[in-house]
Image (cartoon, helix red, strand yellow):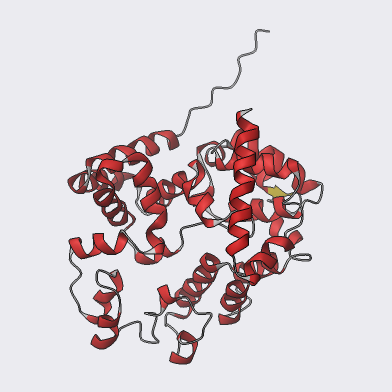
Amino acid sequence: MITFLFRHLRGLCILCFASVAPPAMAEARDAISGAETPEYQEALAAWLEADEAEALPRLAELAESGNLAAQVLLGLIDKSAALQGPHVTYLPREERIALLRQAGGLSGRNWMTTAASESDLARLWVELWMMQGGVELAQGFAELGEERACRESLLAHVSRQERGFAPEVRAANWFPESLRHLTLGRALEPAEGEALPEGHPMRSLAGLEVTPEALAGWLAIDPLAAPLREVCDTNCSETSRDCTLALYEALGSYHSLALMGSPAVALIPEAEFIASPRGHQAVARRIMLMHATRRRESMLHEVAEIDACSADWLREQYEVYKPVRRIPPVSLD
């Protein structure tokens, strides 16, 4: 009964989201065939509940049978450590490859390469991973309604080129407002910094001070910070504002914040992903990946100085990710 209600409510959520989504985003969702099947929906529901042991074998079986949605989702999970929970993280290499990838070659093939022949979204991901394009890839993601992927593509381009974008590119209507600070010289004139909302972290590029209080105010309302707010509203409701600031400081990077969110809104609406146990776990995992193991404990102390509740939550998440020693079965012969 609980499973039925979950699936029913999830369906209503998707329906409501689709009714207000722009045409490009709706078309992108329709293009991912297989997403409508009950088998895929059940596997996805388990994955969003952070039950990898249940979800991933189901997704792998569906991908093998040609389910395009399963192939795209597995391809994204395989390429993003932040989407990999503790179960898959510490599987032996051979088991992990068999679970997340298509058979072939020395270490399997990412399922996205197979999906690319049928999906524009998958094709764009393959081209991005193989560094076969530039700004046009980001524009392609934007036109499909995949804003997070658009941001990831632009940031990857900046990382490769070690420079930002020309004014005419940043002025394009598809270019994300959240990255308009990425000028060619990756610096802002004072007037450009002043034009950013108060508390915006990138005001610092123009030499403007961003106080913790102003930053907390920006984090409380900006769409980019929604994944952090969801975690804090759920786990630290009494100190949610301080918790959000603490998690941002633990993340340590505006651009890392820009990479958060649904792996593909064509498969999982943004609001649904960030409110799920998997979305919460992805926040903790991304923060974890920003710090070397030897640095994590001192980082938790720094977080606790801002908000003790968020530090306790992060510590609990870290415990879940601690590797479990595997003891081989003992033969009685």
Tell whether 233 sits left or right of 85.
left
- At 24% across and 63% down in the image, what residue appears? 215
Residue at 63%, 67% in the rendered image: 25
- 260 left or right, relative to 1: left
- The residue at 25%/59% (across/down) is 216
Q: Across the whole image, how many numbered discs are drawn on residues? A: 0
In front: 306, or 57? 306
- Residue 77 % position (x, y): 59, 51
Can you tell which quarter of the image residue 192 is in?
bottom left
> Picture coordinates of residue 125 (x, y %)?
63, 66
Which quadrant is home to the C terminus? Answer: top right
Q: Is 63 placed above or below 133 here?
A: above
Task: Judge by depth and name the residue closer to the eye, 43 or 114.
Answer: 43
Q: Is residue 108 visible?
A: no
Locate residue 242, reporting x and y percent: 24, 50
Residue at 60% over, 72% down: 141
**In the visual, does 194 lie left or right of 253?**
left
Answer yes or no: is residue 302 visible.
yes
| Residue 94 x/y as whole percent | 65, 41
